[in-house]
């Protein structure tokens, strides 16, 4: 509840100062809607923004100190929840997946297989709830054009038989269908490309009225990055991976070929 408390305290201090979100945003060099996202804990401010808000509201450094403590103590779960919430606000999402199909593209059977591999002794009702939550996230793709989703899959993602051949055949056919509908852009980074510039999963998100963010994830670790320099570095690394990946048509052909291999049991 740390960021929720930060947001409620920011709102209380702003209202006490008689400022609307737009006015406070103008004074600290960001948009009013960005201030609103801080107040609802949808986004966390960069430390320098929190310090500028302190200066405008005369809060004696309180918000800056809270911000630093929350950033330093951020957990994997907090970072993932924050990233999942931001997906619904993003204008563009660019992802690079090295081990698993990204959550937004997963079928129910594939998601179940992923959860069962990581939590083999979890109660069935927990697995069902996690799968349902993952499919709910993917509903943002029900919109015909927004957000713009571009995904780079390392070849290992389509070659690793998560859940078995039938699950993988269905999963790859689902990705191919989305690509053929031009709902998502999908590229495959082939084994022949060598070591990727990005060693783990990364998601880059942009917004209409707020700065971009990057989310990086490894085994039981996650980082939601707001710092412009680190986001720019993640974008540069993503671009390097993209240039090494197969073109869209070749990627689609490879995905369809591997899907047929799984379907035939090869």
Image (tube, rainbow, N blue to C red):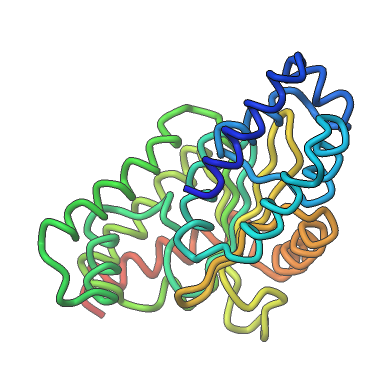
Residue drawn at x 63%, y 26% is: 12
Residue drawn at x 89%, y 26% is: 27
> Looking at this view, is 72 or 208 the one in front?
72
User: Quadrant of residue 124 in the image?
Assistant: bottom left
Residue 120 spot, x, y in % from top left: 18, 77
Viewport quadrant of the C terminus: bottom left
In the displayed orientation, state which residue is furthest to the left: 124
In the displayed orientation, state which residue is furthest to the front: 60
Residue 39 spot, x, y in % from top left: 61, 32
Residue 180 spot, x, y in % from top left: 47, 43
> Looking at this view, is 76 or 168 the one in front?
76
- Above or below, 13 against 173 in this view is above
Q: Is residue 209 shown left or right of residue 248? A: right
Q: Is residue 238 shown left or right of residue 177? A: right
Residue drawn at x 67%, y 56% is: 214
> Looking at this view, is 72 or 80 the one in front?
72
């Amino acid at each position: 509840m740390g960021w929720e408390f930060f947001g409620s305290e920011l709102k209380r201090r702003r209202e006490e100062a008689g400022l609307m979100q737009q006015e406070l945003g103008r004074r600290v060099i960001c948009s009013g809607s960005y201030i609103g996202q801080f107040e609802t804990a949808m986004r966390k401010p960069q430390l320098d923004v929190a310090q500028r808000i302190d200066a405008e509201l005369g809060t004696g450094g309180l918000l800056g100190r809270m911000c630093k403590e929350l950033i330093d103590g951020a957990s994997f779960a907090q970072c993932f929840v924050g990233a999942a919430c931001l997906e619904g606000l993003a204008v563009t999402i660019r992802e690079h997946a090295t081990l698993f199909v990204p959550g937004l593209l997963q079928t129910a059977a594939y998601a179940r297989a992923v959860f069962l591999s990581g939590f083999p002794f979890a109660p069935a009702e927990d697995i069902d709830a996690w799968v349902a939550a993952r499919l709910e996230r993917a509903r943002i793709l029900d919109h015909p054009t927004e957000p713009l989703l571009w995904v780079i899959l390392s070849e290992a993602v389509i070659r690793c038989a998560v859940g078995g051949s039938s699950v993988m055949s269905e999963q790859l056919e689902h990705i191919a269908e989305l690509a053929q509908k031009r709902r998502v852009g999908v590229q495959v980074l082939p084994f022949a490309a060598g070591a990727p510039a990005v060693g783990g999963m990364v998601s880059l998100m942009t917004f209409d009225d707020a700065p971009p963010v990057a989310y990086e994830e490894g085994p039981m670790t996650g980082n939601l990055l707001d710092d412009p320099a680190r986001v720019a570095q993640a974008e540069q690394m993503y671009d390097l991976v993209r240039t090494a990946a197969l073109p869209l048509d070749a990627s689609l052909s490879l995905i369809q070929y591997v899907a047929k291999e799984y379907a035939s049991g090869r």
